[in-house]
Image (tube, coloured by chain):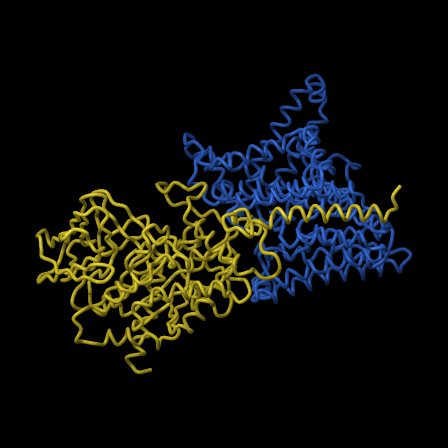
């Protein structure tokens, strides 16, 4: 979550970081910030939850230790065995997988009971998801000898890089560690670009996303039968927009924070709702995870350099796995199967000569139709993402089709304004965004400070309480 | 060409500059209370580890405001109750939570016993129950918020106690009874003519809200009719009206069972009391008010013995609301009414008060203490009992229901205050099952999807649990244990 402490400490930490004269000192500072961020979960927990939070922290530390020791073990051998790599990957995935099992209530009753006593079961421990992906990435890249250094500080910073612990973007070991190896100067342009991303993220989260969630999405999803079809339709659309705003806001703040420290993190989104096909959508949505799955699942399975049925199999496995990472539930399984099937169908259709000829002759219709189909599919499938059980998703679909349609949606004007702005943000061409960004980045220091203060005030004014947790923090 | 160090320093200076500008723009918000709605700490949480006390108070008042304002999108109440669309966490197995798990519609089963803590403080109340020479019923004033305002808990307790100690009539109830603010299950109040209703929630009457926190003022000739809620029910033998000192000689007239009756007017320093002693059972009463803006605080209908359980709740009240009372005015009415027990059950509207979790929760504790003292000051001889607030849920982004983090702490703070102030304490939160119990009650149709309120069945269950605890404590008192 974006916190007052975080926003106050970030520029101070960045200023100290920039004034440090050696890269080693910088690494130690980043490492300390990461450890403090993880420890804060324990310190700030309810007194009754502190033991559980401490155990969560220990679990995360154990994962790091396992990854580090495993990689050292592989490093000793001139030809590390694939069996060791497999064992390490499985062991590293085990805590997250177990957590997902427990959250889904799929573990045995004794395990559920033990976990209830030992672990906090609301969400996985801070960092566990991201660290698991990164530990696997580090291990595999080490195995492939693509990690340029075996220094423990680089490993520590890579695993605990504080801005992205909650929900990524997932960093590839070989890319990120390379950036940590030299002391790069951070220019005023970097600082301005970082501040713009933070400003943009704050606006999306505090002003648009939270208000849409509180004023429209949550009430309708919690009680769909009390609303008309029109209201449900608007809320489902609003959730799709809100989810993008929420997640991309988090990514903006993370990327902006890293930029203040001179580090460039990968982008997570590329206007996903402008995708004209479902395959295109997956190239634009949660790109760091898609890329991770591509690197460490899809390609090892053979990618698209295999016979056709195996390509479809690889696509299905990758997308279902990606969906199940969100939670081991029927909803996410169906979500993954739906998306996997859609991508396979698209791939099949794309290869048909008739379709190729038609789309070549009618590019505009093909793009518009493709966008409409893709966006509608994404919006309707999102219901599975939001509702915790399939029965509730079915209830919502049923209410969507069978409730009265006549009632004018009873949403507040503020909700409509936020939804309109959110839609505008989703579909606005990049060239329209550039002038805004340039105006901020080229503006004087005074303007930047005032705009950041203004967005915080606006967020406070529109909110009726503390900011909601980021949606992806739950995964 | 600047060196890398100079480049770094320029960037750092830029960052610090932007931060200082933002801070300078934001700091005035913390100096002027009128600007508090713009304070970023409302959404970002506090700075540092502990919430400063002024901020805690601010959040308390904001919580109150948010609970009383209309939601941005309210479900249509005329539609049927929805199927639940929210998931629940696995059932808690924590030690020290509910005495027994809830098992379906168990209203007719024996509820688990969760004893009243510090029940020795109920001695004055129990002694009043023991006395056989009384000419008035044993009176209980039960203050609360929306949890109580529908009379769900109190009607169950009332029924249980009246079955054991006799029906003392409805006792005190506000003349401004209105479904928006509170209702009673045992008496019907119908007002005709135009009326203004003021409550302690919104203020506006210089702190004169009578005993019940709600005052009714007619705009011209008007009347209040009182009838039993059920046919065959009687309302006692004594009718009283608590009203403002009138400008006219006869600002109001009273009818009992359809006939005009002479009422004895007793003048108190800040209000007047009209008393009618009727020989036969009262089955209906009418108060005809002929003075515009005469403040009508409440009515009393009671028998000569038995027990009354008088709900005096107002939707939306929190600790701070009780500061709205003119303390002298309230104390005087309380002295006249002489309750044998004062029960207080608030906290539902404080559940988002960040001050509860800050430091030792002093800000919240002091507010609660003040509220309790305000209510007790007119009747220091009365016994006092605090019922903890009920659990409240929170919906995570993923649709799971969890207890608000403040709940256990708030219960603990109320427990501490009860011990310090010589009050008994009943932990309704633990009776529900403690942490995350709201989700389980929701699951069983005992709670509403607003994640705050219980259904009629849920309230009934709380009422049964409390009655059982109270009767058990009384039995222990009787047996000298």
Q: Residue at x 61, y 65 (%)?
A: A52
Which color is chain A depicted in? blue
Classify residue B348 by image quadrant.
bottom left
> On screen, B470 above or below A451?
below
Q: Is residue B269 left or right of residue B145?
A: left
Query: Picture coordinates of residue A350 (x, y %)?
Result: 71, 27
Colour-to-chain, yellow: B
Classify residue B391 by image quadrant.
bottom left
Which residue is more in the foreground, B187 or B224? Answer: B224
Query: Picture coordinates of residue B316 (x, y %)?
Result: 39, 53
Q: Is residue A210 left or right of residue B470?
A: right
> On screen, A467 above or below A376?
below
Quadrant showing the C terminus of chain B = bottom left
> On screen, B194 above or below B330?
above
Q: Is residue A33 left or right of residue A462?
A: right
Q: Look at the image and tell me whether residue A83 can be seen.
A: no
Classify residue A380 by image quadrant.
top right
């Amino acid at each position: 979550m974006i916190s007052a402490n975080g926003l106050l400490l970030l520029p101070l930490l960045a200023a100290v970081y920039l004034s440090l004269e050696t890269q080693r000192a910088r690494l130690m500072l980043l490492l300390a910030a990461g450890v403090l961020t993880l420890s804060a979960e324990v310190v700030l927990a309810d007194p009754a939850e502190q033991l559980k939070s401490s155990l969560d922290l220990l679990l995360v530390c154990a994962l790091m230790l396992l990854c580090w020791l495993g990689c050292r073990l592989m490093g000793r051998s001139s030809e590390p065995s694939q069996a060791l790599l497999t064992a390490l990957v499985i062991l590293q995935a085990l805590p997250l997988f177990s957590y997902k099992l427990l959250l889904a209530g799929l573990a045995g009753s004794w395990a559920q009971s033990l976990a209830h006593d030992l672990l906090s079961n609301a969400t996985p421990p801070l960092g566990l998801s991201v660290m698991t992906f990164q530990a696997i990435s580090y291990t595999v890249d080490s195995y492939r000898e693509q990690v340029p250094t075996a220094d423990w500080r680089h490993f520590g910073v890579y695993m605990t890089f504080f801005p992205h612990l909650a929900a990524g973007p997932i960093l590839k070991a070989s890319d990120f560690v390379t950036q940590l190896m030299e002391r790069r100067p951070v220019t005023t342009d970097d600082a301005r670009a970082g501040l713009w991303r933070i400003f943009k993220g704050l606006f999306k989260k505090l002003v648009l996303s939270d208000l849409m969630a509180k004023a429209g999405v949550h009430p309708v999803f919690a009680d769909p039968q009390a609303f008309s079809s029109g209201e449900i339709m608007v809320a489902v659309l609003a959730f799709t927009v809100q989810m993008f705003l929420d997640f991309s806001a988090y990514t903006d703040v993370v990327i902006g924070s890293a930029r203040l420290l001179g580090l460039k993190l990968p982008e997570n989104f590329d206007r996903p709702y402008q995708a004209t096909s479902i395959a295109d959508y997956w190239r634009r949505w949660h790109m760091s995870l898609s890329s991770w799955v591509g690197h460490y699942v899809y390609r090892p399975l053979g990618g698209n350099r295999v016979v056709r049925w195996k390509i479809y199999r690889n696509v299905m496995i990758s997308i279902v796995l990606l969906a199940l990472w969100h939670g081991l539930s029927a909803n996410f399984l169906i979500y993954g199967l739906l998306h996997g099937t859609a991508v396979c169908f698209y791939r099949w259709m794309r290869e048909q000569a008739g379709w190729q000829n038609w789309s070549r002759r009618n590019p505009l219709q093909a793009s518009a139709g493709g966008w409409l189909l893709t966006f509608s599919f994404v919006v309707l499938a999102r219901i599975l993402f939001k509702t915790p059980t399939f029965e509730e998703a079915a209830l919502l679909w049923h209410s969507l089709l069978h409730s009265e349609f006549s009632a004018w949606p009873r949403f507040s004007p503020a909700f409509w304004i936020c939804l309109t702005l959110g839609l505008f943000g989703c579909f606005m061409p990049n060239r329209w965004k550039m002038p805004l960004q340039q105006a901020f980045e080229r503006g004087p220091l005074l303007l930047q400070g005032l705009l950041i203060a203004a967005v915080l005030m606006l967020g406070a004014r529109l909110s009726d309480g503390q900011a909601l947790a980021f949606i992806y923090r739950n995964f | 060409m600047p060196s890398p160090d100079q480049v770094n320093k320029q960037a750092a200076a830029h960052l610090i500059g932007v931060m200082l500008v933002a801070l300078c723009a934001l700091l005035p918000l913390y100096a002027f209370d009128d600007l508090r709605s713009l304070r970023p700490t409302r959404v970002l949480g506090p700075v540092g580890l502990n919430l400063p006390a002024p901020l805690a108070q601010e959040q308390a008042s904001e919580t109150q405001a948010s609970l009383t304002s209309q939601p941005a999108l309210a479900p249509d109440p005329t539609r049927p109750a929805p199927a639940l669309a929210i998931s629940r966490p696995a059932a808690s197995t924590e030690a020290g939570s509910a005495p027994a798990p809830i098992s379906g519609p168990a209203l007719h089963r024996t509820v688990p016993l969760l004893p009243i803590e510090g029940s020795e403080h109920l001695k004055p109340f129990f002694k009043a129950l023991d006395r056989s020479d009384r000419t008035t019923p044993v009176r209980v004033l039960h203050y609360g918020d929306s949890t109580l305002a529908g009379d769900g808990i109190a009607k169950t307790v009332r029924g249980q106690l009246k079955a054991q100690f006799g029906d003392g009539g409805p006792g005190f109830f506000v003349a401004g009874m209105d479904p928006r603010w509170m209702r009673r299950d045992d008496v019907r109040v119908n007002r005709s003519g135009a009326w203004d209703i003021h409550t302690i929630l919104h203020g506006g009457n210089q702190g004169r809200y009578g005993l019940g926190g709600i005052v009714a003022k007619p705009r011209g000739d008007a009347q209040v009719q009182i009838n039993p809620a059920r046919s065959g029910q009687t309302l006692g033998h004594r009718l009283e009206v608590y009203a403002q000192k009138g400008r006219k000689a006869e600002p109001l007239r009273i009818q009992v069972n359809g006939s005009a009756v002479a009422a004895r007017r007793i003048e108190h320093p800040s209000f007047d009391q009209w008393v009618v002693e009727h020989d036969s059972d009262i089955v209906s009463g009418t108060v005809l008010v002929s003075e515009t803006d005469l403040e009508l605080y409440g009515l009393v209908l009671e028998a000569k013995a038995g027990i009354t359980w008088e709900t005096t709740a107002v939707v939306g009240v929190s600790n701070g609301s009780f500061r709205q009372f003119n303390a002298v005015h309230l104390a005087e009415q309380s002295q006249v009414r002489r309750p044998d027990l004062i029960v207080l059950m608030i906290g539902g509207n404080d559940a988002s008060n960040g001050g509860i979790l800050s430091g030792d929760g002093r800000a919240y504790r002091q507010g609660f203490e003040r509220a309790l003292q305000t209510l007790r000051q007119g009747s220091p001889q009365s016994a006092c009992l605090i019922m903890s607030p009920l659990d409240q849920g929170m919906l995570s982004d993923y649709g799971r229901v969890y207890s608000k983090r403040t709940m256990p702490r708030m219960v603990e703070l109320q427990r501490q205050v009860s011990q310090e102030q010589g009050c008994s304490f009943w932990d309704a939160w633990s009776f529900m099952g403690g942490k995350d119990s709201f989700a389980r009650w929701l699951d069983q149709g005992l709670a509403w999807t607003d994640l705050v309120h219980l259904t009629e069945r849920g309230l009934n269950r709380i009422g049964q649990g409390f009655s059982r605890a109270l009767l058990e404590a009384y039995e222990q008192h009787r047996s000298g244990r």
